[in-house]
Structures are given as structure tokens and as C-alpha cells.
Image: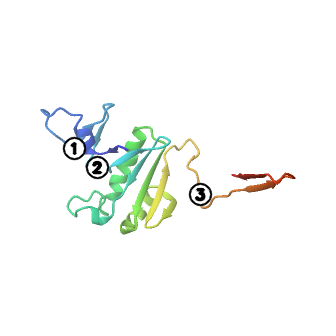
């Protein structure tokens, strides 16, 4: 999975050009990577933001700082719309739970939580009903055992 970030696109620019925070992707689209959050391509024409645990980032280089997170998230939503994506997913560890409120202000809702991570989603197409499925909480299965007169056994599990 490719994470779309400044480093990914900086390799697409000539080394003789002055480096700026605005980078071009392979389609010629320009993004200011200091204003958006890194994201990766996800299934069903969506993108995913994975917020790391606080211990994995330094205070100086924290892209997920609570003071700037909302603005960066809004810019990332705009970028996903420009890329014609249908949805954005964001995973938030419990150490960064305060970011969930900011994501909620931007229209994200809870999809599911496992362990110490919450996953939120946002459907981006206003004119199309959301196709984000509800999270499966359990599995239902059926089984059958058939024994005939010859004592042969047929087992079926679905």
C-alpha cells in the first residue's frame, strides 16, 4: 500500500527545481503536503488516514497535532474530493482520542472499534447514498449432518 505524502511525490520532481511544499502527483495535480494529512489508497475508490500512536511521533514533527488537525483534515477531504474518491476512512488510536471530536466536526462517524483503535468513515458523495456497509459484529453459520441407511455421513458447513 502506497502512502500518499510529501516524500512520495517529491521523487516525481526534478532535483534541479527548488523544493517547495507543493508537490505534483503522477497526474499533474498539485498538493500542499504541509496542509493535508498523509493518506493511502484504500478499497472501493476510497482513501485511508492512519493516525499513529503519540509515541511514534516527535512533538516537533507531529502532523496530527490537535491544534492543526481539523484544518489539515478539512484540506485532506478537499483533496480526496478533487481525486474523485467516494469515502475517507480514518483510524485513531486511543492515545489520540481527542482527534475523534475534530473528525466528528468534519462529518466523520464511528464505523467500528477494535482493541485500542477506533475507525471512522465519511461518505463524500452528496448526491449518492452512502455505500459504506455497517460493521459486521458476528457471523452466522449453518451446518447439517445427514446419515443414510448405509451409515454414510454427509457433513455440510456454510
Q: CA distance from mark 3 to mark 2?
A: 34 Å
Task: Tell me the residue at 84%/51% (across/down).
Answer: 150
Instruction: Return the disc, 1 or 3, that comes first in the chain's sequence.
Output: 1
Q: CA distance from mark 1 to mark 3?
A: 40 Å
Q: Is residue 96 left or right of residue 142?
A: left
Q: SS of the residue at dot 1?
A: loop
How are the colours assigned in the image? Answer: rainbow
Name the residue carrying label 3: 136
Task: Tell me the residue at 44%/38% (across/down).
Answer: 84
Residue 61 appearing in the image: yes
- Badge 2 local density, few (<14 within 10 Å), some, or many (20+)? some
Name the residue carrying label 1: 21
Occupied quadrant, residue 59: bottom left
Residue 35 percent location from the top left of the image:
28, 49
Name the residue carrying label 2: 35
Q: SS of the residue at dot 2?
A: loop
Number of dots carrying numbers = 3
Q: SS of the residue at dot 3?
A: loop
Q: What number is the disc on residue 37? A: none
Task: Tell me the residue at 36%/58% (across/down).
Answer: 51
Mark 1 touches mark 3? (CB < 8 Å): no
Instruction: Return the disc, 3 or 2, that comes first in the chain's sequence.
Output: 2
Q: Is residue 95 left or right of residue 114?
A: left
Residue 74 percent location from the top left of the image:
38, 51
Mark 2 touches mark 1? (CB < 8 Å): yes
Instruction: Return the disc, 2 or 1, that comes first in the chain's sequence.
Output: 1
Amino acid at each position: 500500500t502506497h502512502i500518499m505524502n510529501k516524500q512520495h511525490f517529491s521523487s516525481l520532481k526534478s532535483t534541479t527545481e527548488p523544493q517547495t511544499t507543493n508537490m505534483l502527483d503522477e497526474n499533474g495535480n498539485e498538493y500542499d503536503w504541509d496542509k493535508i494529512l498523509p493518506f493511502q489508497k484504500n478499497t472501493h475508490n476510497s482513501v485511508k488516514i492512519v493516525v499513529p500512536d503519540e509515541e511514534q511521533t516527535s512533538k516537533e514533527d507531529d502532523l496530527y497535532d490537535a491544534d492543526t488537525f481539523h484544518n489539515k483534515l478539512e484540506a485532506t477531504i478537499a483533496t480526496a474530493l478533487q481525486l474523485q474518491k467516494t469515502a475517507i476512512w480514518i483510524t485513531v488510536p486511543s492515545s489520540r482520542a481527542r482527534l475523534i471530536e475534530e473528525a466528528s466536526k468534519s462529518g466523520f462517524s464511528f464505523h467500528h472499534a477494535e482493541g485500542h483503535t477506533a475507525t471512522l468513515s465519511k461518505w463524500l458523495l452528496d448526491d449518492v447514498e452512502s455505500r459504506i456497509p455497517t460493521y459486521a459484529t458476528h457471523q452466522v453459520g449453518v451446518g447439517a449432518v445427514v446419515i443414510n441407511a448405509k451409515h454414510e455421513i454427509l457433513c455440510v458447513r456454510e
